[in-house]
Amino acid sequence: MTEKSPDKTHPVGTWIDTDTVEKFHYYMDRGELRYPCCPQTGTALGYTARQCPKHPGEDLDWAPASGGATLESFVIYHQRYSPDFEPPYNVAMVALDEGPLMVATVLVDDLAKLVIGMKLISHFEPAGRLVFVPT
Amino acid sequence: MSKQAIGSVVGLGFSEISRGPIGSTRDAASAAVNAALADAGRSLSDVDGLLLARSPAKPSAELPLKLQNDLGLHNLRLYASVEAEGASAIQMIQQAAMALHHGMAEMVVCVFADTPLQPATATGAAAYNRVMPLTGIPQWEVQYGMFGAAGPYALAAQRYLSTYNAKPEYFGEFAISNRTWAGLNPDAFLRKPLTIEEYTASRFVVEPFHVLDCAYPVNGAVAIVMVAPDRAPDFAQPAAFVHGMGQGHLGQPGLRGADRELRTGGQLAGEGAYKMAGITAQDVTMCQFYDAFSYLGLVSLEDYGLVGRGEAGPYIADGNTRPGGALPVNTGGGHLSGYYLQGVTPIAEAIIQLRGQADARQVPNNDIALVTGSGGRLDYHAAVILSPMGALS
């Protein structure tokens, strides 16, 4: 894994959210993929969660992810929406082995190799972006 | 014992609807309100309730609460902007019906207005080039280029194809069904007959979606006038009676197995609406679905219990939803071929059908209409059951 540059604290832009998300970025900035979990039981929660519904009012814990994942779905962008992204490119929904879902991209030399259910492993690009590669 | 209606729609009005400039969203809203009141044969002085809805892609200033002053409405007893994204239009009807039922207001006007197509945003891709959050980390998706709404919906559609081993042509069959209806609707924007070969040959936007899987944006506004059901006979237009109302918002747990792409809150919304109306899915004689993308047509048929899980594609391909089919769906062409005004398109079409004013596309049985709204990425759902009958036996 590659460390992000110290000044790059967020993937992009400005946004407003709860303090919970700051912790996610704290770890990501150090090249660690973590996922939210219940502080009482360690049960995995989704990245959409800001508290454990069974133990409300407590800060979430952030557990290290193994990096293993499964391709839940993918799409191929043909429409150009941004000069930063040259079509065709894939956008994927992946499920970490621990359960949480996240949008990402899968590094493949041929988009035809993408199959729902394929096994993946996480990887940090030099610039700090999290991607997934087939295992 | 027969079931009495909760509310009734007695006026329907449109602003100019166009791919070109029509002025501000705010002025379009006023034009639609005026047109709806004229259709109802009433004036602004009769209105004591107003509900607004706008596109989630637009700021609140686009259609502000100041609209009251634009219109000169100074004695409102009910007034709000409804914020449930694509479910807002149906929720306006629901809120109005509840207020009317309890006597909180006597005449409520609901209006949706949007002007997404401007010189700098002249296409759907440009007009809706924003990030729909799916992961739960703000702006996370930007680094992967997941812009626009087509991508998030296409992720759901792809998972549907894989789960049910369904053919991507089924999405095209829904687009063709809508287009066939649009051919009978002089107010629809895309009326040229469409074949599956033409669909398949059309360009991909975000695979598996072709451009013909996407809603057709326009600038415009639609307003309706609602009163309590016992007042409906006083109006010139035949009433559309509200019998059932439901919502379903399942949230996104963000965990594998939640399958929010395949089973949406539409199911919960449908169950609530059917129960309130005292009917079942089998009683529905036509559907007006919120179809921002073709996939919503398929998943709506399944969520609302009209076909089994994974069965929507063959059901549509067999012609059931087309003119002459067993269950007419999106009879004006829907958002795909009619015009995309985020949830008021299906409402307007339902009212026209319930009045018996749909001419060449009039359905043979307009007894029970299911009309839906869907917002977010399959997140927020609302449904109403409408009928030309004031009481359902």
Image: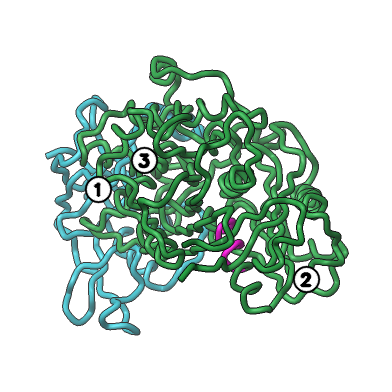
- Nearest to the observer: residue A88 or residue B125: B125
Which amino acid type is shown beneath numbered disc 2? Answer: Asp
Apparent colour of chain A: cyan
Q: Mark 1 to mark 2: distance in Å?
A: 50 Å
Q: Which residue is mark 2?
A: B48
As for residue A91 lying within the magenta part, the answer is no
Q: In the rendered image, what is the letter of the chain coloured green? A: B
Magenta stretch bounds: B88-95
- Nearest to the observer: residue B359 or residue A33: B359
Q: Residue at x 53, y 53 (%)?
A: B86
- Nearest to the observer: residue A53 or residue B140: A53
Q: Which residue is mark 3?
A: B298
Discs 3 and 1 carry the same chain letter: no
Picture quadrant where residue B67 is located: bottom right
- x, y (%) of residue B303? 34, 52
Q: Residue at x 43, y 36 (%)?
A: B294
**Nearest to viewer (mark 3 / mark 1):** 3
